[in-house]
């Protein structure tokens, strides 16, 4: 976080920072080569593929595109993607707020373990995220017989897909809130408490408004991952087109069936959703940084007597 | 409101912040907690407010045991060292906060809330600033807003944690005088934490001197300054020089 704060200083405001930039500055040709490499990388690995996706979708003309988006199976995959995201994102928003609250506001045994566990889904392959639910709720899993006896279907159905996606997207809300809530401290909440506010009133009137942009950032990141998840979902979905296929799974199905224009049509729709998310994310980042800095400022101002000398 | 504390103890890990403190504060008194950093005076104030909970000992408000009551039930007016104003709310909303969150049955009408907020702004001499945000005010102004916000809910006791700690010397003196006059007028039981002995002796009726979590000396400014055999107090107040 420190780096961008330094760069936001107007030139000359801090002489030491100024000379530091000058002292570490490379010769012009080195800078040009480095920037050139980065630009080439971006062009070939990010920009070109995106362009190809849209080009592929339009390759056989607009009619094929229109047909694709009236096809029952394709529309159903979009619907499934939205349903999964619609359940997963609110659930993980609630989990994320609760986890961030617990970690930043309380000191308890196992706090470090919880902090590490939040990151777990980022460290393991999404396929494992899918497999654990098969092992738990699948026909031969721990709860399989009981679920079968009660005629509840989790694996190869929507509940399993929601569970797998929830696992994969869990870290995003919590991770974007924890540093923010740590920077802001608890004094405003304590002030509200001494004024007679209840826990819920404090959450609604103080905490949520203070973290709203960080929360928004986490939620859309979570949403982007939820809509784009392939690995975990492909393990627990039966991959039946028109029944349990989400957009990423449907793209794979169409591609394997040599229906390239249709595959690219769905892919471009998914890419558009991602681009929309990206622009919302940028807005949130900008707003969040301002809130974060405001939090830091209010912390820096007074000299607070340390509790542990 | 009178406050009685009996053998209160609070540790953070292995560090005893407040160690077996007993005190009785009478209704209408203005008492200063004086001591060096880390002497436990802020922790004691937070224990009284209910922002921390004691390991041992009890706290009574007007004879009623409040030891296990939450801060939002005790409703002690608390002014934080860093003010802890709600930065996303206007000054009006800040001062009205305690009135807005009151239980529906006890909540004042909109007009009554407005009336009280405006009259508080007048008392702290900041009329006309109700639509500003905290970041638009100076340190001294924010301090007074924090004060008005605590007073809005009509607390029976006012707890001030280094109320003038973050202000420059001139504003500090002005606000200190103002606080003294306010207390003369209202006789609201008040406790304030400070490490500045001049501040303590000028404003307070009685001064409690802390060191290492324990009370070293209690008395009126005159009693304390007229001499003591406690080595720490003599050294801290520089009475030997």
Image (cartoon, grey):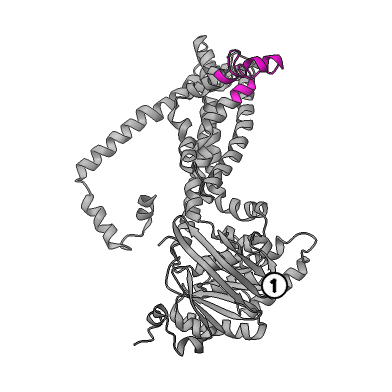
Q: Please say if B57 is above or below A129.
A: below
**Direction top: furthest residue:** A257
Name the secondary structure under disc 1: loop
Q: Is A149 colored magenta in this rendering?
A: yes
Residue B10 placement (x, y as % from top left): 52, 61
Q: Is B145 colored magenta in this rendering?
A: no
Whether residue A47 sits left or right of residue A191 in the image: it is left
Residue B62 placement (x, y as % from top left): 69, 72
Residue depicted at 76% across the width and 66% down the height: B110
The answer to whether any part of residue B175 appears in the image is no
Residue depicted at 58% across the width and 36% down the height: A92
Q: Please say if A224 is above or below B164.
A: above
Quadrant (top left/top right/bottom left/bottom right) for the C terminus of chain A: bottom left
**Direction right: furthest residue:** B105
- The quadrant holding residue A73 is top right
Q: Which residue is mark 1?
A: B62
Q: Which residues are magenta?
A: A135-162
Whether residue A90 sits left or right of residue B217 in the image: it is right
């Amino acid at each position: 976080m420190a780096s961008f704060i330094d760069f936001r200083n107007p030139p000359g405001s801090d002489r030491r920072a100024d000379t530091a930039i000058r002292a570490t500055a490379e010769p012009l040709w080195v800078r040009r080569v480095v920037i050139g490499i980065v630009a080439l990388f971006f062009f070939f690995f990010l920009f070109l593929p995106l362009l190809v996706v849209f080009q592929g979708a339009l390759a056989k003309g607009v009619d094929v595109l229109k047909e694709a988006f009236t096809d029952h199976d394709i529309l159903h995959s979009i619907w499934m993607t939205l349903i999964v995201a619609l359940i997963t994102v609110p659930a993980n928003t609630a989990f994320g707020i609760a986890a961030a609250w617990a970690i930043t506001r309380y000191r308890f045994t196992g706090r470090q373990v919880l902090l590490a566990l939040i990151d777990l889904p980022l460290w393991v392959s999404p396929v494992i995220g899918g497999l654990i639910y098969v092992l738990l709720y699948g026909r031969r899993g721990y709860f399989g017989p009981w679920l079968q006896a009660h005629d509840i279907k989790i694996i190869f159905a929507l509940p399993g897909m929601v569970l797998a996606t929830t696992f994969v997207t869990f870290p995003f809300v919590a991770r974007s809130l924890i540093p923010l809530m740590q920077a802001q401290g608890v004094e405003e909440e304590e002030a509200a408490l001494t004024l007679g506010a209840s826990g819920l009133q404090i959450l609604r009137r103080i905490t949520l408004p203070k973290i709203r942009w960080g929360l928004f950032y986490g939620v859309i990141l979570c949403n982007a991952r939820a809509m784009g998840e392939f690995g975990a979902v492909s393990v627990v979905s039966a991959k039946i087109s028109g029944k349990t296929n989400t957009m990423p799974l449907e793209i794979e199905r169409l591609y394997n069936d040599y229906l390239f224009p249709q595959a690219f049509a769905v892919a471009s729709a998914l890419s558009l959703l991602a681009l929309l998310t990206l622009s919302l994310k940028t807005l949130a980042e900008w707003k969040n940084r301002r809130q974060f800095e405001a939090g830091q400022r209010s912390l820096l101002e007074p000299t607070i007597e340390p509790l542990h000398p | 409101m009178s406050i009685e504390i009996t053998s209160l103890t609070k540790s953070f890990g292995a560090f005893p912040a407040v160690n077996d403190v007993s005190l009785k504060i009478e209704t209408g008194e203005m008492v200063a907690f004086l001591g060096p950093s880390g002497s436990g005076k802020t922790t004691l104030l937070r224990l009284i407010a209910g922002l921390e909970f004691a390991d041992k000992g009890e706290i009574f408000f007007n004879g009623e045991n409040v030891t296990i009551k939450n801060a939002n039930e005790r409703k002690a007016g608390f002014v934080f060292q860093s003010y802890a104003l709600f930065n996303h709310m206007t000054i009006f909303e800040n001062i009205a906060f305690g009135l807005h969150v009151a239980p529906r049955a006890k909540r004042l009408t909109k007009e009554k809330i407005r009336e009280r907020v405006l009259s508080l702004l007048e008392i702290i001499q900041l009329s006309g600033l109700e639509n500003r945000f905290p970041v638009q005010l100076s340190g001294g102004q924010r301090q007074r807003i924090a004060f008005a916000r605590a007073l809005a809910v009509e607390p029976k006791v006012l707890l001030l944690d280094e109320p003038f700690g973050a202000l420059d010397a001139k504003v500090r003196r002005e606000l200190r005088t103002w606080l003294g006059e306010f207390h003369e007028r209202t006789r609201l039981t008040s406790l304030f934490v400070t490490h500045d002995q001049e501040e303590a002796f000028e404003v307070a009726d009685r001064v409690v001197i802390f060191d290492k979590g324990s009370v070293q000396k209690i008395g009126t400014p005159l009693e304390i300054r007229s001499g003591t055999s406690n080595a720490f107090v003599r050294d801290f107040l520089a009475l030997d020089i």
